[in-house]
């Protein structure tokens, strides 16, 4: 499975009335630029022979139709199959956030990016998997080692997980009958 990091970004500007945008420093516009720039991290920084995913999954900014807020924020996740790629994406995200803020005359705060799961590749992995998996969970994915019955899953077959620690999982990662 992929190692994953969570990130929180807040941009602070100067809010004001929507009819007078020239008197504000709009963090919503700056956040839009940041989100668009983030979409180029993988395509323009990560080696095509490696894999990575950056997703902005929550956006907040303002509550009124006619008021430009003083603050806008987003959060998201970075996922990669190796620590080097994850570090590259973290650094790229930080550079983008630190560059967009002054360009839009707002202040940026990228909270410490924290790791929620480390990838454990190779023979040392407790639960080896057949292919990379993008969902990153705190508990490991089960595999064909799982003694479970065969069940339909999507267009193929999968084993239902019977390992207690995996009770939240719906199916194992391998679909090869025993």
Image (spheres, rainbow, N blue to C red):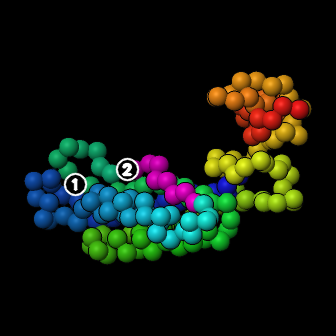
Range drawn in magenta? 52-60
For mark 1, what is the residue? Answer: 68
Horizontal and vertical percent position of residue 61 = 33, 51
Residue at disc 1, secondary structure: strand
Residue 19 in magenta stretch: no
Residue 120 vs residue 100, the one in the foreground? 120
> Which residue: 18% across, 58% down?
16
Horizontal and vertical percent position of residue 132 = 69, 52
Does residue 108 appear left or right of residue 47 in this picture? left
Horizontal and vertical percent position of residue 43 = 47, 64
Q: Quadrant of residue 53?
A: bottom right
Give above or below for 126 relative to 24: above
Residue at disc 2, secondary structure: strand
Estimate how packed mark 2 is, as few (under 14), some (14 to 19) or many (20 or more) residues with alpha carbons within 10 Å.
few
| Res 33 seen here | yes
Give above or below for 4 relative to 142: below
Give the mark, 2 or 1, whose residue is nearer the N terminus.
2
For mark 2, what is the residue? Answer: 60
Give above or below for 71 relative to 141: below
Does residue 154 appear left or right of residue 34 in this picture? right
Residue 106 vs residue 163, the one in the foreground? 163
Does residue 100 appear left or right of residue 135 in this picture? left
Residue 174 vs residue 85, the one in the foreground? 174
Horizontal and vertical percent position of residue 124 = 87, 60
> Which residue: 81% across, 35% down?
176
> Which residue: 37% across, 50% down?
60
């Amino acid at each position: 499975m992929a190692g994953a990091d969570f990130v929180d970004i807040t941009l602070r500007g100067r809010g004001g009335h929507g009819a007078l945008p020239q008197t504000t420093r709009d963090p919503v516009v700056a956040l839009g630029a940041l989100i668009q720039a983030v979409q180029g991290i993988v395509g323009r920084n990560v080696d095509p022979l490696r894999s990575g995913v950056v997703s902005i999954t929550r956006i907040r900014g303002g509550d009124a139709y006619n008021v430009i807020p003083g603050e806008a924020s987003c959060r998201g996740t970075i996922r990669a199959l190796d620590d080097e790629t994850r570090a590259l994406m973290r650094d790229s995200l930080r550079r983008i956030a630190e560059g967009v803020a002054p360009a839009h005359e707002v202040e940026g705060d990228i909270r410490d990016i924290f790791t929620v799961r480390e990838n454990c590749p190779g023979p040392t992995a407790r639960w080896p998997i057949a292919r990379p998996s993008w969902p990153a969970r705190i508990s490991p994915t089960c595999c064909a080692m799982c003694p479970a019955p065969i069940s339909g899953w999507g267009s193929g077959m999968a084993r239902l997980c019977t390992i207690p620690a995996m009770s939240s999982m719906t199916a194992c990662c391998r679909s090869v009958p025993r």
